[in-house]
Image (tube, grey):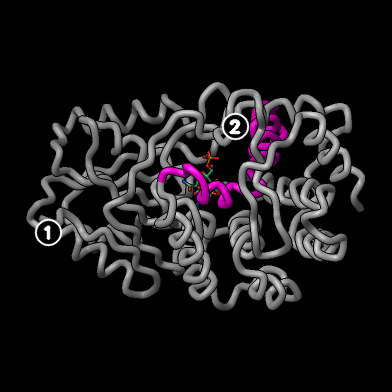
Amino acid sequence: MKYLNNEVVIGADALPKLLEALQQPAVSQIFVVVDANTFRYCYPILQPQLPAHTLIELPAGEEYKTITSCETVWNQLTDNSADRFAVVVNLGGGVITDLGGFCAATYKRGIRFIQVPTTLLAQVDASVGGKTGIDFQGFKNQIGVFQEPAGVYIDPQFLRTLDGRQLKSGYAEVVKHWLIADAGAFATQRQAGVLVEDWASIIEASVATKQRIVEADPLESGLRKVLNFGHTVGHALESYLLAQPGREILHGEAVAAGMLCEAWLSAQRGLLSSQEQESIELFLFSVFEKVQFVTLEAEPIAELALQDKKNSGSTINCTLLDGIGKALYDQPVTVAEIAESLRYYHRLE
Ligand SMILES: NC(=O)c1ccc[n+]([C@@H]2O[C@H](COP(=O)([O-])OP(=O)(O)OC[C@H]3O[C@@H](n4cnc5c(N)ncnc54)[C@H](O)[C@@H]3O)[C@@H](O)[C@H]2O)c1
Ligand SMILES: O=C(O)C(=O)C[C@@H](O)[C@H](O)[C@H](O)COP(=O)(O)O
Ligand SMILES: [Zn+2]
């Protein structure tokens, strides 16, 4: 029996389809996970139509993507006697979809969860593909499991309350999808900067790219690593700055900087022409501010890449671009090369 629908719905149909899925008799209880902002801005859109449910509210932000927040969720599930037919609905950005998905995937060895992403980043990337998890010891997504959601319901109307900085952060993952798999879209869109009129078609194209890659390699044994372009350096930078009070950075901002570093590494190996590298730089700098660090920090930031999940032993396996629109995974890079790429980034005007 199909327990829930295992569907990805994008657009005006998303919320009606979500409600249809939740009305199935096989659903024993519904838990809705929100953060403080999605409680304020997104829950009022959903709440009037939702069947009876228990609300679980967490504080907002990456610093709460922790085991302590998981305990809050697991405590609520346990205290409300959630059984294996309960469903967790994650209403939020990537922090909530990653964390809520992980809590559901591990509670009683796994109950179903549904993603209702409310940031651009979560709509184009985090809600799709089944990577769930939390940060640990300052390392990004260090603890987690692969588990596909029972459904993903993407309604771009949630983006109306998202601020410009968060929109740009999500846009970095859109650009990543173009750089690894869609040279045509990059060529067409790079003149326009951040588009605000038609998010639905941008989301559809991004989700289609990600789904195609995930279907070919759901557990990241090979091809899926292309989705990690920009993240070897990006996650190192994000982990480094998150550990420093007052030097907050968003995931997409770190990925944008990481893509510039990894484009430089690609060019150093003759995989990317200098014209292609320059077009990536011009485009990303038309959207993103430069991430601030001093050159002395390049080495300690680079060392954090030794914890990257794509590594084998002490070899850092990076995803590089083989021209715009094509990526090569498992390209060994050293800490010294990553540090050099960060120093290059630091010198860019
Ligand atoms: N699982 C994956 O494949 C995957 C992919 C990409 C990123 N991620 C993870 O996603 C996380 C980043 O996600 P994010 O950028 O969505 O961050 P986030 O979840 O922290 O959301 C960003 C901010 O926007 C607020 N917010 C959310 N929806 C809103 C809305 N509609 N209106 C107003 N405010 C709203 C949130 O409360 C938060 O303050 C990172 O932890 C990253 O590692 C996971
Ligand atoms: O879905 C994937 O695979 C990705 O790599 C998408 C990334 O944008 C995302 O940030 C992901 O959470 C990174 O995963 P990690 O395995 O490097 O922690
Ligand atoms: Zn990412």
Residue 29 part of the magenta-drawn span: no
Give the amino acid type for the residue marked by disc 2 in the picture: Asn
Q: What residue do we see at 69% from left, 49% from top?
A: 320
Q: Is residue 274 above or below residue 252?
A: below
Q: Point out residue 126 in the picture as x, y percentages from the top left corner.
A: 47, 51
Mark toward the viewer: 2 or 1: 2
Q: What residue do we see at 34% from left, 67% from top?
A: 9
Q: Is residue 42 above or below residue 298?
A: below
Report the disc number at residue 24.
1
- Mark 2, residue position: 311
Q: Point out residue 268 in the picture as x, y percentages from the top left corner.
A: 84, 48
Give the amino acid type for the residue marked by disc 1 in the picture: Gln
Query: Picture quarter containing residue 237?
Result: top right
Q: Nearer the viewer, residue 309 or 76?
A: 309
* Residue 176 visible here: yes
* Residue 40 visible here: no
Secondary structure at numbered mark 2: loop
Query: Picture quarter containing residue 340?
Result: top right
